């Protein structure tokens, strides 16, 4: 299989390779001598939480206010 580098230094992975990593958006890129090594990165749970908070329109100020409230509220 071949992948051609564009003038903008972009590579398109062959379909046979890309389909093995469906759902992967990011790859860790490194070199190993004369080779390029791509390692798929899975989304972290933190990314999922951030996305869900954004969907609920909960921002950083809301989270800070909730933490402040929780710290100031007396416990039984």
Image (cartoon, rainbow, N blue to C red):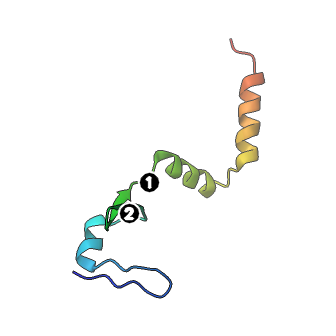
Q: Which quadrant of the structure image shows residue 39?
A: bottom left
Instruction: Check the image and name the residue furthest to the bottom.
Output: 7
Q: Residue at x 44, y 54 (%)?
A: 43
| Quarter in which the C terminus is drawn | top right
| Residue 38 pos. (x, y %) | 34, 63
Pointer 2 residue? 24
- Between the C-alphas of marks 2 and 1, the distance is 8 Å
Pointer 1 residue? 43
Instruction: Check the image and name the residue furthest to the top.
Output: 76
Q: Residue at x 25, y 72 (%)?
A: 17
Question: Relative to 38, is 49 above or below?
Answer: above
| Quarter in which the N terminus is drawn | bottom left
Disc 2 crowd rating (10 Å Cα; few below 14, some 14-19, many 20+) is: few
| Residue 16 pos. (x, y %) | 22, 76
Q: Earlier in the sequence, mark 2 or mark 1?
A: 2
Question: Relative to 33, is 71 above or below?
Answer: above
| Residue 36 pos. (x, y %) | 34, 67
């Amino acid at each position: 299989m071949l992948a051609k580098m564009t003038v903008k230094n972009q590579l398109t992975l062959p379909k046979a390779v890309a389909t093995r990593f469906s759902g992967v958006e990011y790859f860790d890129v490194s070199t190993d001598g004369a080779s390029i090594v791509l390692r798929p990165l899975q989304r972290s749970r933190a990314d999922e939480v951030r996305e869900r908070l954004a969907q609920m329109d909960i921002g950083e100020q809301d989270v800070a206010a909730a933490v402040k409230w929780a710290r100031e509220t007396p416990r039984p």
